[in-house]
Image (spheres, rainbow, N blue to C red):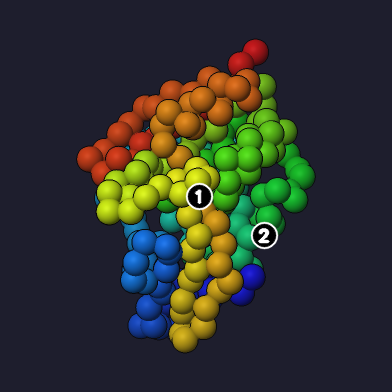
Amino acid sequence: MTDLPGKAIHDYYFNKSKIKLYVKDIFGPKVEMPLSLYFRGFSEMPDLEKKALQLGRGKILDIGAGSGSHVLELQKNNDEVYALEISPAACEVMKDRGVENVICKDIFKYKGEKFDTLLLLMNGIGLSSTLEGFKKFLKKAEDLLDPNGQLIFDSCDISYMYEMAEKPDYYYGQVKCRYEYDQLLTDWFEWLYLDKKTMTQIATECGWNAEVVFEDENDQYLAVLSKRN
């Protein structure tokens, strides 16, 4: 798929581009994804993200690291932190910003070291695409974590989006999306939004302990998962 988010991040950072990045889903008109969100400092991050960074420990892998803002904050604490990102364009940005350890890979194809913390923010867990994909991701996470490691991610319940429409006959958090940037479009792809109950049920079935450690007023939550011994 065309890497429009990576190109947008790259253009914004290196060229000071004013071109807007949009995301379109099944619910209505396209919505702008402000590129400045990828370049926030700690003070500008929402409390949920601040909490997640504070919970990171040991050797940390930020999955879907984007422009590297979360990694840069963790580096300030002298944490051993790695940024994994599938977009080569975004990886260029991270390297220029001073991210020390950049891995340009698809998480499902990455094989390497073990980590104490796996981190996915800004609904990065959505890369799982479907409920079956989430189960597949949990298996991958198990392979990448040390025995006492932790998986930290945020997601949200989007049932409110269906107040004026019928829920589909598949899990309602599986949403078809596409990006638009500079008059270009990506293919449609699925992105996953997990409500707390479904997330906890699947995690438990797959042998994980799941704890919701933070919730905000927008139905977003932060979860910490650890593998049951």
Which type of secondary structure does the marked residue at label 1 adopt? strand
Report which residue position mark 1 lands on: 174
Q: Is residue 196 above or below residue 104?
A: above
Q: Residue at x 67, y 22 (%)?
A: 147
| Quarter the N terminus occupies | bottom right
| Farthest-out residue, bottom | 183
Of circles 2 and 1, which is in front? Answer: 1
Counting from the top left corner in percent of width and height, residue 126 is at 51, 49
- Residue 147 seen by the camera: yes
Viewer-closest of 175 and 74: 175
For residue 158, side relative to residue 229 (left or right): left
Q: Residue at x 48, y 26 (%)?
A: 200
Amino acid at dot 1: Gln
| Quarter the C terminus occupies | top right
Q: Is residue 10 above or below residue 228?
A: below
Viewer-closest of 184 and 49: 184
Q: Are marks 2 and 1 in contact (CB under 8 Å)?
A: no
Q: Residue at x 33, y 31 (%)?
A: 214
For residue 70, side relative to residue 40 (left or right): right
Dot 1: within a 10 Å radius of its alpha carbon, few (fewer than 14), some, or many (20 or more) residues? many
Amino acid at dot 2: Cys
Dot 2: within a 10 Å radius of its alpha carbon, few (fewer than 14), some, or many (20 or more) residues? some
- Residue 71 seen by the camera: no
Counting from the top left corner in percent of width and height, residue 73 is at 42, 48
Query: Upstream in the sequence, badge 2 or badge 1?
Result: 2
| Farthest-out residue, top | 229
Q: Residue at x 58, y 71 (%)?
A: 187
Instruction: In the rendered structure, find residue 122 and report the number of the disc placed on it.
Output: none
Q: Quadrant of residue 47?
A: top left
Instruction: In the rendered structure, find residue 104 and report the number of the disc placed on it.
Output: 2
